[in-house]
């Protein structure tokens, strides 16, 4: 089945990726992503206070992936102790 769309109809269709730099009107937005204390404890594994100012990005870190908050390589490269037996 072939569907033909006229130019008038095409204006009403939103296809993701046509304008990746624009957010569609009415799209949901995350206003704030508070992290519980346990998230900060895990994110700061292997680090001791006082924390450098460069780590303050964690205060605005949304709920997206960042390699800083997950274990990395093992062995001699595990400088934060993520893989040590507890």
Image (spheres, rainbow, N blue to C red):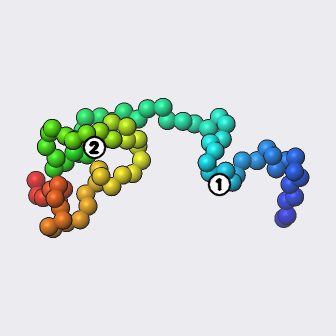
Viewer-nearest of discs 2 and 1: 2
Q: What residue is at 62 percent from the left and 42 percent from the top? A: 23
The image quarter containing residue 27 is top right
Of residues 50 and 73, which is closer to you in this image? 50
Q: Quadrant of the N terminus?
A: bottom right
- Residue 54 lies in quadrant: top left
Q: CA distance from mark 2 to mark 1?
A: 33 Å
Residue drawn 48% across the image and 31% down it: 31
The residue depicted at 16 percent of the width and 47 percent of the height is 47
Can residue 65 be seen here? The reply is: yes
Residue tagged 1: 17
Q: Tell me residue 59's x, y (percent).
A: 33, 36
Whether residue 39 is visible here, answered yes or no, is no
Q: Nearer the viewer, residue 78 or 35?
A: 78
User: Considering the numbered disc 1 on the image, is that residue within a helix, a strand or a loop?
Assistant: loop
Q: Earlier in the sequence, mark 2 or mark 1?
A: 1
Element assignment for label 2: helix
Q: Which residue is mark 2?
A: 54
Along the viewing direction, whichever of 17 and 54 lies nearer the viewer: 54
């Amino acid at each position: 089945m072939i569907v033909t769309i006229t130019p008038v109809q095409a204006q009403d269709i939103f296809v993701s990726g046509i304008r990746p730099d624009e957010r569609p009107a009415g799209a949901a937005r995350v206003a704030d992503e508070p992290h519980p204390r346990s998230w900060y404890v895990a994110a700061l594994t292997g680090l001791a206070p006082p924390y450098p100012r460069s780590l303050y990005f964690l205060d605005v870190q949304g709920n997206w992936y960042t390699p800083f908050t997950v274990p990395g390589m093992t062995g001699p490269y595990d400088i934060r102790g993520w893989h040590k037996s507890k």
